[in-house]
Image (tube, rainbow, N blue to C red):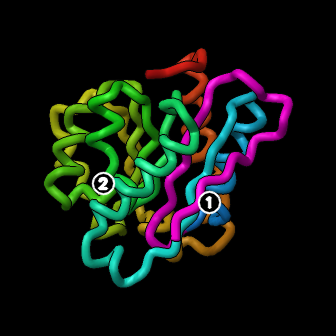
Amino acid sequence: MITVQDVTPGLHEGGPRALVLPGAGYSAQAPLLYWTVEALLEDGIRVSVVSWEFDEEARRDPRSFVESAVEQALGEMGEWPDLVVAKSISSHAAQRFVAHGIPGIWWTPLLAVPAVGEALRAATSDHLVLGGTADESWRPEELAGSAAKVISAEGGTHSMEFPSRGWRASVDEQGRLVEAVIAHVRALALNGGAG
């Protein structure tokens, strides 16, 4: 089951809009996405969040599942977002957003998947790609030649935790990464009405 929820308080009507796509088992309530959403809302950006049950059928064909979720979200939103924020499995949607010129924040994308690597190599500097060196799916060499901005966090896992340095280091590092995301978004100077 896929749901799309506008989590924006009513005071942001008409401003720029972000679409947040979760990971397979990493919802928008998990730290990286939760704090990203909160920061976007504080900056006056409307936010729509996709939630899903990533079941066995989705695991068999994750790309089709993600594409279906994106299709549903765009239909319910009635417009293209001005920004996409995606975690892990949702990087299967990179090709669509890059091709449409929608800036993106790509948390721990699956760069070992050829279509994902190819899409993010074609990304402009409007895209920020973040991953950790302790994550098997993080292959920054797949981004060679990309204009996307890349942050490679030393020792970060797929959840951008830093277990060798303890929980406090994980919290601090995640906060630093979310600050980098928000600085990137602010530099985009989103106006609303993308697409």
Q: Which mark is residue 92?
A: 2
Q: Is residue 15 left or right of residue 68?
A: right
Residue 83 in the image: x percent, y percent? 51, 33
Circle 2 residues within 10 Å: few <14, some 14–19, many ≥20: many
N-terminal label among 2 and 1: 1
Question: Could you give the CA–CA distance between mark 2 and mark 1, rounded to whole angstroms?
Answer: 17 Å
Residue 170 percent coordinates (x, y): 60, 65
The image quarter containing residue 143 is top left
Q: Position of residue 107 (x, y in %)?
A: 45, 52
Query: From which residue to which does the magenta span run?
Result: 1-26
- Residue beneath the point at 63% across and 45% down: 48
Kind of residue indicated by mark 2: His
The residue labelled by disc 1 is 28
- The verdict on residue 24 being magenta is yes
Residue at 26 percent across and 78 percent down: it is: 60
Numbered disc 2: secondary structure:
helix
